[in-house]
Amino acid sequence: MSMATSTLTKPVFSSSSSSISKPTIKTSLVSFNTNPIILSLSKKKRSFVVNNVLKTVKPTQTNDVLGASNISKDVGSLVSKPTILVSEKLGEAGLQVLRSYGNVECVYDLSQQDLCTKISACDALIVRSGTKVTREVFEAGKGRLKVVGRAGVGIDNVDLQAATEFGCLVVNAPTANTIAAAEHGIALLAAMARNISQADASIKSGKWQRSKYVGVSMVGKTLAVMGFGKVGSEVARRAKGLGMNVISHDPYAPADRARAIGVELVSFDQAITTADFISLHMPLTPTTNKILNDDTFAKMKKGVRIVNVARGGVIDEDALVKALDSGIVAQAALDVFTEEPPSKDSKLVQHENVTVTPHLGASTKEAQEGVAIEIAEAVVGALNGELSATAVNAPMVAPEVLSELAPYVLLAEKLGRLAVQLVSGGSGIKSVKVVYRSARDPDDLDTRLLRAMITKGIIEPISNSIINLVNADFTAKQKGIRISEERVVVDSSPEQPVDSIQVQISNVESKFASAVSEGGQISIEGKVKYGVPHLTCVGSFGVDVSLEGNLILCRQLDQPGMIGHVGNILGEENVNVSFMSVGRTSLRKKAIMAIGVDEEPNKEALDKIGAVPAIEEFVFLKL
C-alpha cells in the first residue's frame, strides 16, 4: 500500500478528562517521531541486544538489527563508521576487532585538555588505568560519546555519575586478567616471604648475604584475603594449595562459594588482627579509600606482611611507611600506588622491606590479548546496540536472565510509549506504577531491565534529552517522576518469566477517557504472544492487538457494521489495516475498537472517523 501523507501541521487533542464522560472534541492525534527498539540475541556472546537503546545510529528498517558492517541512515543521510579513540596501549588482537568495525585512532599520553579536544569527534573511548575520564571529558563529548571501555577491572578512573548523566555506557573487561592478577599476587607473596628481590639486588651488587635474607615459610600461616571477588577467590585457591590457612573479609561474598573453596568469611577486624599475611583485592570506593591506615595498622599482628595488587588508594601510604619503620608491618609487596608512577624519592618505594612492581598484575601475554579482545568486543557491541553483561552503569543482569527477558523488553518499552501518549495536559507525569504478573516468586524475577525500558518509553517522547537505557532512571529522577513496581503472583506457566506487564499513570488527565481504570489511573496492559508484544487491556476493556506499526483506539456504541465502516474510511484514504480487535463491557453497550494501521492516517481520514455518530472518542497513537 502507498503511504498516506497527513496534512495536519500540529496535533489536535481531545478535551476528555480522566472521567468516562463523552468528550466534546472527538479527534485526537498524537504523533511522536520515535524509533522502535529491535531485539536480537548475539550468537557469539550471551549478551542482550537492544538496537537503538544506546542511540548510536538509527536503523533504516525497523525489522533489522545492526551488524558490524551495516551502514545506516540517520535523518536521511549516511552515517560513517564510528570513530574509536584508544588512549592507552591495547593488544593487537583487540585493535583488529575494532578496525573491522570502525575508524580507530590510537593516541597515547594525552593531556586532559587534548583528550577533551579530541573526544568531541569520537563515538567511543578505550582506556586503561592511566587516563582520567572526568566530567569535563563527557561534557566535551557533546552527546556523541556513546561508550567508554576500561581495559581491565577497576573503573575508579571513570566518572560513572557523569557518564550516566550524559547517557554514555561504561564497560570493563573483568574476566580476562583474573588469573594473571591472581598469579601475580601469589608471586609477590612468595617473593616477599623469601626476600627474592632484595637478595637478587644484593648479589648483583657483588655481595653474598645469606644470613641477612632469611625468609619465612607460608605453610600453616594465615592469609587474609580482603575482597573475595574473581581475583581474591583465585588467590585463595592457590594459597590453599600452598598449605596456607585462608580467611576472607567481603560483606558481599556468598558464604557457600567461600566454603566450597575452604575459606572462612570473617569480619574486617577479625581478618586484620589474626592474619600473618594480608592480600588486598578490593575496589577503590569511598568506603575502601585508605582503609588500611594508622588505626587499622595498630590492630594488626606484629610482623604482618601485606600484598596489594588491587588499588593503591586502599592503603594510606604514609601510614604504611610508619608501620614498616615500627615493625608492625614486617614487609609489603606492592604492585599499585596512589600515584602512578610514584615519585622517584618515594619513601615507600625506597624502603628496604618493600618489594615493588610497576602495576604488572594483568601483564601477561595471554591476559593482555584476552583483555584487548574482551573490551574491544564489548565496545563494538555497545556501538552496535548491545548491552553487555560487563556494563557497569546500566542495569546489571546476568546473561541467562538477559536472554530470558529478551521478548519482554520491547513490550516494556512499547507500553511506556503508549501510556505517555494517552496523557493530556495537567502538571505532568509524577507517578508511574508498573505491575508484573508472574507465576514465579518475586525474588526470582529480576525486573531492573524492564523498569529501565518502561522509563525510557515514557520519558523519550516528552523530552528534548537523549534518553537511553543508561540514563533512563537518572533522568526520571531528575524530572521528578517516581517509578514504583509491584509483583503479583498468578497461576500461569512458570516457564515464562512474566505473564503480563501493566503500566499505570496516576494523577493525570487522559486524552482517551476509556484508558482510565476504575481506580482513576491511566492503565494499559500487555503480554508477549508468540514472541511478539501485544496490547491486552486498555482501562477496563480487554483487547488483543499486536504492538506493531501505529494504533487507533476508538470508544463506540457496540452496534453492527462499525468495523466495516471504519475500515472503509481507512481504505478510501489508502491506509492499510493490519489488524482489528474489539473489547466490550457487555452486548450492545460500550466497546473499544483497536485498529492497527501501517501508515499514519491523514487529517481527512481522522475527521471522517470522528464524524461517525456511534464513535464517542478516539485517539491515534504512533509506536
Image: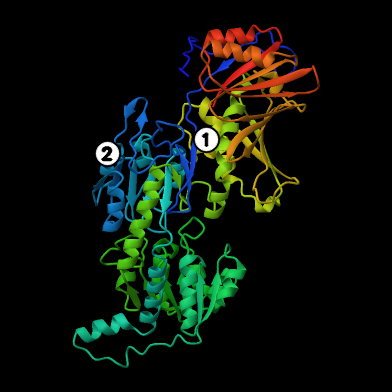
Give above or below for 206 relative to 507: below
The residue nearer to you, when weighing 181 against 580, is 580
Camera-nearest residue between 559 and 135: 559
Q: Which residue appears at 40% of the width and 47% of the height?
A: 381
Judged left or right of residue 329, residue 127 is left
The image shows residue 562, relative to residue 189, as above or below, that is above
Distance, label 1 to label 2, CA atoms, is 27 Å
Indicate whether 480 appears above or below 608: below
Residues 93 and 246: in front is: 93
Give the image location of residue 4, x and y in percent.
Answer: 48, 14
**On residue 117, which mark appears?**
2
Label 1, secondary structure: give it.
Answer: helix
Q: Earlier in the sequence, mark 1 or mark 2?
A: 2
Q: How many marks?
A: 2
Asked if residue 391 lies left or right of residue 352, the reply is right
Residue 371 drawn at (x, y percent): 36, 59
**In the image: residue 246, left or right of residue 88:** right
Q: Where is the C terminus found, in terms of image quarters?
A: top right
**Is residue 485 among the parts visible in the rendering?**
yes
Amino acid type of the residue that numbered disc 2 sits on in the rendered structure: Thr
Q: Element at badge 2?
A: helix
Residue 11 occupies quadrant: top right
Residue 223 vs 424, above or below: the answer is below
Q: Residue at x 52, y 37 (%)?
A: 472
Q: Read off the residue under disc 1.
A: 475
Residue drawn at x 35%, y 37% as measured from the top left: 141
Residue 473 on image: x %, y %:
55, 39
Residue 527 occupies which quadrant of the picture?
top right
Nearer to the camera, 181 or 67: 67
Q: In x, y percent, where is residue 317?
A: 39, 66
Q: Amino acid at mark 1?
A: Thr
